[in-house]
Image (cartoon, rainbow, N blue to C red):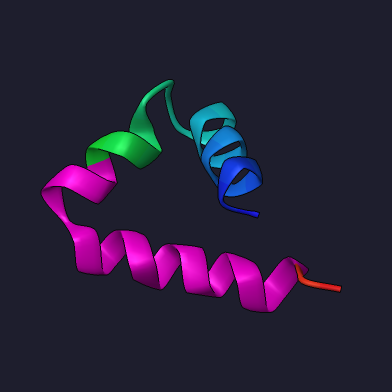
Amino acid sequence: MLEIFIELTNQIFWDGYAQQLAQENPAGFQMEFNDFLNSYQC
């Protein structure tokens, strides 16, 4: 699911967005990833 999250956010924002967010704001990255998991997990 992490790979899908990274691919999706890169398509929505810009290429490298997820990696930049993870480096600059790890807590924000985790929050967005958790929201993604809660919204799209089957």
In the rendered view, does 37 fall on the left or right side of 35?
A: right
The extreme top residue here reads 15
The extreme left residue here reads 24
Residue 19 figure quarter: top left
Q: Is residue 33 above or below residue 2?
A: below
x then y, percent, for residue 22: 26, 49
Q: Residue at x 24, y 36 (%)?
A: 20
In the rendered view, does 19 fall on the left or right side of 25?
A: right
Most common secondary structure along the magenta stretch: helix
Is residue 14 located in the magenta-colored stretch of the structure?
Answer: no
Q: Nearer the viewer, residue 2 or 27?
A: 2
Span highlighted in magenta in the image:
21-40
x then y, percent, for residue 28: 27, 65
Residue 36 figure quarter: bottom right
Count of marks placed on residues: 0
Q: Residue at x 17, y 44 (%)?
A: 23
x then y, percent, for residue 2: 56, 51
The extreme right residue here reads 42
Q: Quadrant of the C terminus?
A: bottom right
Q: Quadrant of the N terminus?
A: bottom right
Residue 27 figure quarter: bottom left
Q: Is residue 8 above or below residue 41?
A: above
Q: Is residue 36 above or below residue 15?
A: below
Q: Residue at x 36, y 34 (%)?
A: 17
x then y, percent, for residue 10: 50, 30
In the rendered view, does 25 fall on the left or right side of 8?
A: left
The extreme bottom residue here reads 38
